Amino acid sequence: MAEFVEGFEKLSRIGPCVSIFGSARTKPEHPYYQLAEEIAYKIVEHGYGVISGGGPGIMEAANKGAHRAGGTSVGLNIELPHEQEHNAFIDRDKLINFDYFFVRKVMFLKYSQGIIVMPGGLGTLDEFFEVYTLIQTKKIGKFPIILVGKSFWSGLIEWIKNVVLEENMNIHTEDLELINIVDTADEVVQVIDSFYAQYLLSPNF
């Protein structure tokens, strides 16, 4: 309960933000790290803040890009056996440490206007499918889901299309339209801007 209270108190003041998920093990010299940093920078230029999982790797890149652009940089960190220490690019008053995954997920979803999923492991897949399921079942409002890296994600999407959908496993063709797969920072920004332009909304809503 204390984690919920702290999360609601701190995050209620952050303004419109986009969450960026991805591997904690991606090094700064890796193209995915550099792309995540560029995406975060451009998102801030378009009026949004950035929420990450607060740790190293892609999360650090996301906070670094937001910080470099002078925007809101939020970190929702969680203590794990092998990782993770929070990164140095989170706004001092916008770092929250969690013990419980489920509380952390609530905070990600409640305060995000979209999610960007960079390449990652089981944690990243868990976050992606959690959001995908909640939107598909209309438990939360629709917002952009953007997978970055066609070469990384296309096999998974083809499997969903050709196996899950074909075998009628509670998924429909229109559910596939909830996902956008892109390769560049400009494409990410375009997806987010286009989505909210449909509803005549801006980052100041």
Image: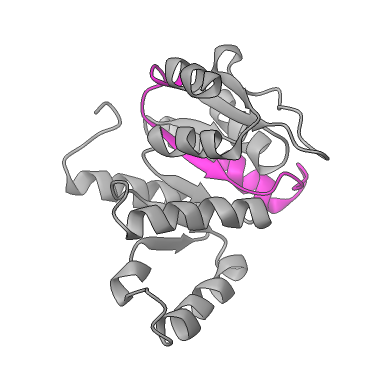
Q: Using the rendered view, name the quadrant where residue 104 is placed.
A: top right
Q: Of residues 93 and 105, which is closer to you in this image?
A: 105
Say which residue appears at 46% left-offset and 80% top-offset.
164
Say which residue appears at 32% left-offset and 46% top-offset.
140
**Does residue 193 sit above or below 97 in this rendering?**
below
Residue 50 is situated, as x and y percent measured from the top left of the image, at 49, 32
Residue 194 is situated, as x and y percent measured from the top left of the image, at 28, 50
Give yes or no for residue 33 being in the magenta stretch. yes
Q: Of residues 63 and 109, which is closer to you in this image?
A: 109
**Does residue 16 sit above or below 132 in this rendering?**
above
Q: Residue furthest front?
A: 1
Q: Using the rendered view, name the quadrant where residue 45 is placed.
A: top left
Residue 106 is situated, as x and y percent measured from the top left of the image, at 46, 36
Say which residue appears at 31% left-offset and 50% top-offset.
139
Residue 99 is situated, as x and y percent measured from the top left of the image, at 65, 30
**Does residue 89 sit above or below 202 in this rendering?**
above
The answer to whether residue 147 of the structure is visible from this angle is yes
Q: Residue furthest right?
A: 82
Boundaries of the magenta span = 11-38
- Report the colour scheme: one colour
Q: Using the rendered view, name the quadrant where residue 138 is placed.
A: bottom left
